[in-house]
Image: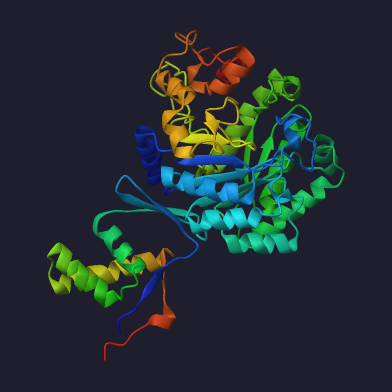
Amino acid sequence: MSTKYEINPNCAFRHIDGELVILIPEKQRLHRLKDVGLRIWELVGEGKTSEEICEQIVAEYKVERKEAEQDVKEFLDLLLENCIITPNINREQSNF
Amino acid sequence: MIVDEDTGIYNWLLATSRGKQIPLFGMIELTGQCNLYCRHCFVTSEERKAPGLTTQQYIKLLEQMHKSGTFFVMLSGGEIFLRTDLYAIIEKAKELRLSVRLFTNGTLITREVAHKITTLYPEAVEISLYGAKNNTHDWLTRVPGSFEKTVAAIELLTERGVLVVVKNVWMRFNWSEADDWLTLVEKLGGVPRWSANVVPENNGGLSPTELRLNDEQLMELYDWELAWKQKNDRFKNSYPEETCNKINNDGNNLERVMGCGATINNYLIDFRGEVMPCPQIRLSAGNVLNAPFGHIWKNSRLFNQLRAMRDLPVSGCQGCTYWRHCNRCPGLAWIEDGGFTLPSSWACKIARIYSEVE
């Protein structure tokens, strides 16, 4: 199963000096994303599935597929845990 | 936002916006009109008539602010809930993914309004509560019943999970209620914040400053604050302590002329659309009805003059032994003491008293 996510519709964010600052009102927390983390967040915003995000990271950063899968999964879990993204339940897709 | 673990990110934001002169923090006064008549208010009777700009003008302004780099928007008044288009303005800010704080007296926040606020996800709602008893608060606001409504608003919001910053200005008449006020705010689920800075009217009128704490009360305030901070470590860095982003002068005693963020990463737009350095320095850099905000921010002669004097030492502060407790505001120095480059007599007084008590 490849999951789709969406950026938390309630959060505030803006790019500053090449990085992204995100404020989550529900959690009263500030976050800062850069480099690959920022790229993953952008791909979520573009509506990519977790598998598509992984493919894109492999292509852009020349990393091993297996390593990318693990890293992307962990990072998406972290974004979920902090309410930066939410699962897009209606758009979950099966690979099969 | 409560900045404890987030302090590093917040400090990076401050440093980056200062270094690049990004107008990160913008306050908009949406109206001069208010349903209370607070004795210490800095808005003049003439300004109280100003209705603010139109909805469309604010929508365009928010777009310009966003384009120029603003992230934190504070909506203030007058009383913002007197505007029937307030939700439309907030919704536009949220659409632009700006972080919104609402400054209000809370008296117009009913159950329905509280519910609506919850759906708009503001970063925080800041509500002024000037005492622990209804007659104290109502004496200051000159509106009987305002205390009950404000307290109810705080409760309606906190029970819905909204961060409510409950603000107070300690003055001669309400200082005796400090402990009870703190107990009340904590019971209501709010985050307490206070100041002793009663500021002059926007036209320079000094009558509000007659309400300031006397020397003995300032001494008591120092001890009271210290005791409270020791018990409440996590609020030491609660953002924004003030909206001024004062640069700490730890490590030297060279007070800067513009030690705050005004014109560097902070600004104010008043209810006529005039762009100003901050709520204290009521000098116009230009009007957003005549030029885009970004153009004014970058090119205003006033802003560039203030930026040029930013790091100059304040004449008269050299050699001062009270500097560790100095929280000089250039705006107050300008209004009360005659110039941006001078010491602020109010800051000097507090610093002297705090140094003596320490």
Q: Is residue B60 above or below residue B94?
A: above
Q: Position of residue B72 (x, y in %)?
A: 49, 46
Q: Residue B119 appears at what percent x and percent y?
A: 60, 64
Q: Position of residue A72 (x, y in %)?
A: 26, 69
Left/right placement of residue B345 relative to residue B105 reads left
Q: Nearer the viewer, residue B252 or B117?
A: B117
Write the residue at 74% across / 24% down.
B208
- Position of the C terminus of chain B by quadrant: top right
Furthest-bottom residue in this view: A96
Q: Quadrant of residue A1?
A: bottom left
Q: Quadrant of residue B78?
A: top right
Evaluate whether residue B259 shows in this view: no
Name the residue rendered at 52%, 28% in the picture.
Answer: B285
What scheme was used to colour the molecule?
A: rainbow
Residue A17 image point, x, y percent: 31, 44
The correct choice, above or below, for B271 with respect to A40 in the image is above
Front residue of this view, candidates B5 and A84:
A84
Q: Residue at x 13, y 66 (%)?
A: A63
Horizontal side of residue B59 vs B147, given as left or right? left
Residue that protrudes farthest toward the right in the picture:
B144
State how many labels appear.
0
The answer to which of B331 and B84 lies nearer the viewer is B84
Q: Is residue B275 visible?
A: yes
Please identify the residue farthest to the front as the structure is shown.
Answer: B290
